[in-house]
Amino acid sequence: MSLIGFHKLLIATAITFCALFAAWQGALFVREGGGVSLALAAFFALMAAGLAYYLANLQRFLGRRP
C-alpha cells in the first residue's frame, strides 16, 4: 500500500470515528440534555464534514490534478 493510500485509510477511519462520536453525543443530548454533549456533537460533526471534504479533494491539496 502506498503512503497516499495509507493516508486515505487513516482519514476514512477518522471520519468514521468523528461521525459515530457525534451521533453518540447527539443521542446523549436528546436523552439527558446538557450543553457539553451538544457542543461535542456539533464539533465532531463539523470535524467529520471537514475531513470528508479533505479526503474528497486530497489530490488537489497535494498539488496534483485529479
Image (cartoon, helix red, strand yellow):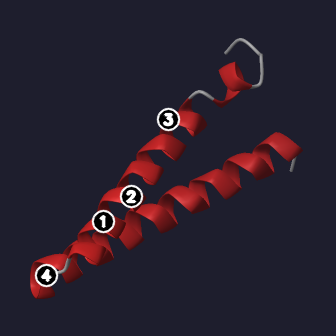
Residue at the spot of label 2: 43
Q: Which quarter of the image is occupied by the C terminus?
A: top right
**Residue 7 position in % (x across, y down):** 75, 49
Q: Secondary structure at mark 1?
A: helix
Residue at the spot of label 1: 39
- As measured in the structure, the alpha-carbon distance from the residue carrying label 1 to the one carrying label 2 is 6 Å
Give 35 or 12, whichever is nearer the viewer.
35
Amino acid carrying label 4: it is Gly
Amino acid carrying label 1: it is Ala
In this rendering, which labeled residue sits more in front, label 3 or label 2? 2
- As measured in the structure, the alpha-carbon distance from the residue carrying label 4 to the one carrying label 2 is 16 Å
Of all residues, the one furthest to the right in this rendering is 2
Q: Determine whether 58 is above or below 31 in the image.
A: above
Amino acid carrying label 2: it is Phe
Residue 33 is labelled as 4
Amino acid carrying label 3: it is Tyr
Q: Earlier in the sequence, mark 3 or mark 2?
A: 2
| Quarter assignment of residue 41 | bottom left
Residue at the spot of label 3: 53
Left or right: 13 as drawn, with respect to 36: right
- As measured in the structure, the alpha-carbon distance from the residue carrying label 4 to the one carrying label 3 is 30 Å
Q: Determine whether 17 is above or below 52 in the image.
A: below
Q: Residue at x 45, y 52 (%)?
A: 48
